Amino acid sequence: MKNNPQFIYLIPLGDVGDKHLEIIAESIQEQFDLPVKIAANQGLPVYALDADREQYNSNLILRKLIDNAAPDALKVLGVTTSDLFNPIFSFVFGEAQFKGKCAVISSHRLRGNPENETKIGCPPLISRLEKEAIHELGHTFGLRHCVDPDCVMKYSVGLECADRKFSYFCTACRELMLWHLSTDLFLKA
Ligand SMILES: [Zn+2]
Ligand SMILES: [Zn+2]
């Protein structure tokens, strides 16, 4: 059927560079072995902005992504450069619906100290974004945090942890992801 949910949608929310989107899309396609569509910019919902904190509520952004998901979207990942928070954490790199459809990530806190950006050996922002994208999408496939420090599903307390891990799943997480993926595709076919 034409509208079978089979695509991962990448949705820019505000001013996200095309180059970054393309690299994230390629990484996701490789890790999940699913076709990726880069959608038109949807912008951030004004009502998600907490003016006092100068941050956006990631719960409300997720809600909007869920409401606007295309019929052929198996998963939806919103990408923003704005700072995110939720009712539990004062800031988040990203947030996902566990075993759900949608996730959102932000590059804001992944930039770290701007002085470090120019230092030799400092991992570029894009590699952190790739990991965060795969990590949050992993949650939508039912993956929990992993104890393997190399695994992309390892919970990153800070940027050091994020830089330590790889941008792919350990064997156990990969198998679990593929199992959830086949169940997802089967149920929605
Ligand atoms: Zn996580
Ligand atoms: Zn793992």
Image (cartoon, grey):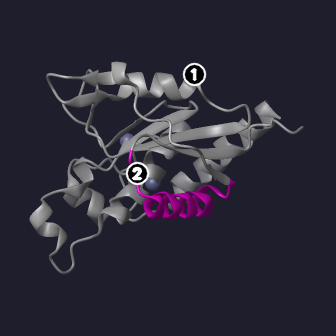
Q: Residue furthest right?
A: 1
Q: Horizontal and vertical percent for residue 86?
A: 28, 26
Viewed as shown, does residue 180 lie left or right of 163?
right
Tell me the distance, in whole angstroms, between the alpha carbons under discs 2 and 1: 21 Å
Viewed as shown, does residue 185 lie left or right of 132?
right
- What is the quadrant of the N terminus in the image? top right
Residue for badge 1: 67
Residue 163 numbered mark, or none = none
Q: In this rendering, does residue 142 appear at all?
A: no
Place residue 68 in its image quadrant: top right
Viewed as shown, does residue 4 lie left or right of 84?
right
Q: Horizontal and vertical percent for residue 35?
A: 69, 54
Q: Quadrant of ligand 2?
A: bottom left
Tell me what residue is drawn at x 67 percent, y 38 percent: 74
Q: Horizontal and vertical percent for residue 41?
A: 51, 42
- Three-letter amino acid code at the position of disc 2: Val
- Three-letter amino acid code at the position of disc 1: Asp
Tell me what residue is drawn at x 53 percent, y 55 percent: 172
Question: 30 or 147: nearer the eye?
Answer: 30
Which span of residues is magenta-colored? Answer: 15-35
Q: Is residue 32 magenta?
A: yes
Residue for badge 2: 16
- What is the quadrant of the C terminus in the image? top right
Magenta stretch, main secondary structure, is helix
Q: In this rendering, does residue 129 appear at all?
A: yes
> Dot 1: within a 10 Å radius of its alpha carbon, few (fewer than 14), some, or many (20 or more) residues?
few
Relative height, residue 103 to residue 149 (above, below): above
Viewed as shown, does residue 176 lie left or right of 186?
left
